[in-house]
Image: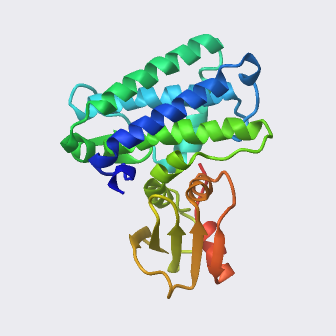
Amino acid sequence: MSEWNAMTYEGKDTILRVVNDEAQRFFRLAEPREAWEAPTACENWTTRDAVGHIVDTTEGYFAAFDAARGTGEQGQVYGLPAMAERANSQAIAFRDLPQDELLDRLRTDQQKMTGLLESLSPQDWTGLMVTHPYMGPVPAFFYAAGQLMDYGVHSWDIREGTGRAHALSADAADLLVPFMFALWQGTVRPERDTSPLQVGIRVSGRNAADYRVTIDENGLSYEPGDVDNLPAVLEFDPASLVLTTFGRANTGTVRGDQETADRYLNAFFRI
């Protein structure tokens, strides 16, 4: 189902549609006056801070695309280990702005980012390398996924803060599945036990697949393949994989050696 793989141009229209759906859901959650100062699943963040964070990331994307096209200066790459601290400081810098002003700014940013992504050619979608402030040079399609992570996961954070039961949408979770392995690659703990570790990851949904995942002194690598001969297999539905990778929840089903699975799940820092 190539239309559900946003790493290909065939998935472009699908992910842009779902990003817009998630953005509109996010705006509806952030618009009530009583929601603005309400807590979210992100420690010490209110809804206001989630809005400020997405303004910061989206406007950073504009600068990154300008640099990739030779019309702006290349920004600094901070690496994922620095993301939590820097993203927090950038988000709370918007706390003095009124709710209406900050939401209008984000709506404008979202429309501009949608136009930028819609304009990408098949060659640009996979071939234009744009330097991400935390992940370094990545193909342009990653920025559509970045928008989906922001609007989809932070909508989940706002709903989680209400204390009500809720769930992540299938469309958002399915599209994010292929990107979670790249996120795992970037969040391996530097102080981990570097002796080799191999597990299987089985994911259901539109991007269902089995992956052989290895962590060793060189970091994390993965490839699709048979997992039946591995010491532990972790099974996830798409939303559980996303929420686990982002450190929002401890989910999944372990088949096989629990100690191996535990070592794998604790090999990452959370963002």
Q: Residue at x 62, y 67 (%)?
A: 265
Q: Is residue 204 above or below residue 87?
A: below
Taking depth in this image into account, of 74 and 54 the one nearest to the observer is 54
In depth, the one of 176 and 13 nearer the eye is 13
Q: Position of residue 224 (x, y in %)?
A: 39, 72
In the image as oriented, which residue stretches furthest toward the right?
A: 163
| Image position of 147 (left or right of 120) | right
- For residue 17, which quarter of the picture? top left
Q: Is residue 26 visible?
A: yes
Residue at 50% x, 88% y is 229
Q: Position of residue 2 (x, y in %)?
A: 33, 55
Quadrant showing the N terminus: bottom left
In front: 195, or 256?
A: 256
Q: Report the side of 138 relative to 92 (left or right).
A: left
Q: For the point 45% across and 44% down, which residue is it?
A: 134
Q: Nearer the viewer, residue 136 or 179?
A: 179
Which image quadrant for residue 51?
A: top right
Q: Position of residue 44 (x, y in %)?
A: 73, 35
Q: Is residue 252 above or below residue 168?
A: below
Q: How is the image coloured?
A: rainbow
Q: How many marks?
A: 0
As drawn, 137 above or below 178: above
Q: Position of residue 238 (x, y in %)?
A: 55, 57
Q: Is residue 59 above or below residue 15?
A: above
Residue 132 shows up from this direction? no
